[in-house]
Amino acid sequence: MNTETRTITLTVNGSPRTVTAGKSISEYLGSEQPCGGHGRCGKCKVIATGDLSPLSESEKNLLTEEELKKGFRFACLTAVLGDCSVVTLQSDAGDVKAVTDGEMPEFPLNPAFVHYGAAIDIGTTTIAAGLYDTDGTLLCEAACLNPQIAWGADVISRIEAALDGKAESLALSIRSAIDDILAVLARKASVSAEEIDGIVLTGNTVMLYLLTETDTEPLSHAPFTVHRSFGETVTADALGLSCIQPDTPVYLPPCMAAFIGADITCGILATRLCESAESALFADIGTNGEMGLWTKGKLTVCSTAAGPAFEGVGISMGMRGAPGAIDKVAVHGNQAVCHVIGDKPAVGICGSGLVDAAACLLRLGILDETGYLEEETVTLKDSVTLDQSDIRMLQLAKSAICAGMTALSASAGIQPEDVDHAIIAGGFGKYLDMGNAEYIGLIPAGLQDKIRVVGNASLTGAAMLLLSKNFRDTCYRIAGDAEILELSTDSVFVEQYMMGMMF
Ligand code: FES
């Protein structure tokens, strides 16, 4: 078939688009070409993988060996020949809105740094970071996309890519993103990056494996053995970080299981879940739906493969909660009325908008309880539409979260609505309308009034570990004492997951 007329999937920053093959990446992105697309300036660099034209002479000459390994290409000179994935690079990380705010409890300081310290949370989709001084003051924050999206939106595709010989590229790409974010933090706070002399770096287990180039093979199949669970200090040099002093200590908090990582240990630390006399459910709804239940002095944790739909990834017009994203939808009269972030035309929809939109379409009778969309595509606002495949993605994601909460509660002999408190962490939860979340079956019935939303608890926990080394013991206790609930063989989960597909 002629390349020019072939329809292929071009995934940009995790969101797939159907396009006709044959154009340059720049043409699809509509990006600026400072040198007119002649391959001279290198300003159009992206990370691209998949069916692409071979490296041009300009790219071979101007890209470093390390950049080539990371999958860098010049968008202006790289033709899209078949299915491929592109990640655009944010040099200032400014336009990626990852929630960096969390609720920091008060505690005595015992910093793990001398001048400035950085807390970093590597999410599957976004990286968020904060810079602190020795008084515990948050000097500035930064966020950027995780460039590993070029190798797949979820942890399973990243593991597969690593096993397919891309482990070094994956490690180099995340390390360079961390270097960039440290440089952005230093610039924002007007300090030298070399003065950042202590780092706590958290993330899910797969993210930490890929960062440290630990063999992911045991994470790729049952029984998903974790042969390195972290809770260790490495040097910046060992991680290949180059913008700070090589001997800077980087603490990697402990993980609990293959799919219950240091991000959850940090989140549980930050919310002080295990210090309460009352029962509490904790759920971090991101690309992975990880959750924990604290009841009768016991912590049980589990992880659901919710997928990245709530982060706007894998939805036809999905995007993160940035200007131009529909983030809220409400029914007015007999119409769905959309709110858009920033004073801009709508260009996409983020996770909270997706939940609202589904709730509104259900109320308006455009969507039925089986998830069937009456129209092929529904226009929400401007050119932003939802189609049947978006609804199917949402059904899978919302059902996984809700079934996980129900199964976790059942393992403790209670119903979800019996818990005293529910804590929702993660960027998506921050903007979620809990009424709509319950209406579409994303959270179990009876829970919404007990919910407290805490933002990026993983990053808050990392900051606590940075500001007081005393919390390390607490983390080891959380990770060591937690009981893992394996959902794939849990009969309550399997049943609830099937039932929960319905709206
Ligand atoms: S636009 Fe200058 S190298 Fe691509």
Image (cartoon, rainbow, N blue to C red):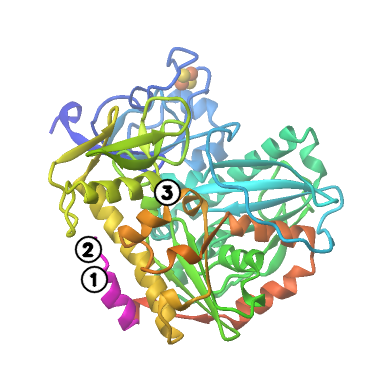
Residue 377 can be seen in this image: yes
Q: Eyeballing the image, is 496 above or below 322?
A: below
Q: Amino acid at mark 2?
A: Met
Q: Secondary structure at mark 2?
A: loop
Quarter of the N terminus within the rendering: top left
Q: Residue at x 64, y 47 (%)?
A: 129
Q: Amino acid at mark 3?
A: Glu
Residue 221 can be seen in this image: no
Q: Quadrant of residue 368?
A: bottom left
Q: On the image, numbered disc 2 is attached to which residue?
A: 502
Q: Residue furthest top?
A: 36
Where residue 328 appears, x then y in whole percent?
Answer: 39, 41
Give me the disc on residue 311. Answer: 3
Q: Residue at x 43, y 83 (%)?
A: 414
Q: Residue at x 56, y 40 (%)?
A: 66
Q: Amino acid at mark 1?
A: Met
Magenta residues, start to end: 490-503
From the viewer's side, name the closer residue of 10 and 420: 420
Q: Are marks 1 and 3 in contact (CB under 8 Å)?
A: no
Q: Residues within 10 Å of mark 3 (few under 14, many from 20)?
A: many
Q: Alpha carbon of mark 3 to alpha carbon of mark 2: how far?
A: 21 Å
Determine if the C-beta at disc 3 is less than 8 A from ligand 1: no
Instruction: Count every numbered label the image shows and give the total.
Output: 3
Q: On the image, numbered disc 1 is attached to which residue?
A: 499
Q: Alpha carbon of mark 1 to alpha carbon of mark 2: how far?
A: 6 Å
Lower position in the chain sequence, tag 1 or tag 3: 3
Quarter of the C terminus within the rendering: bottom left
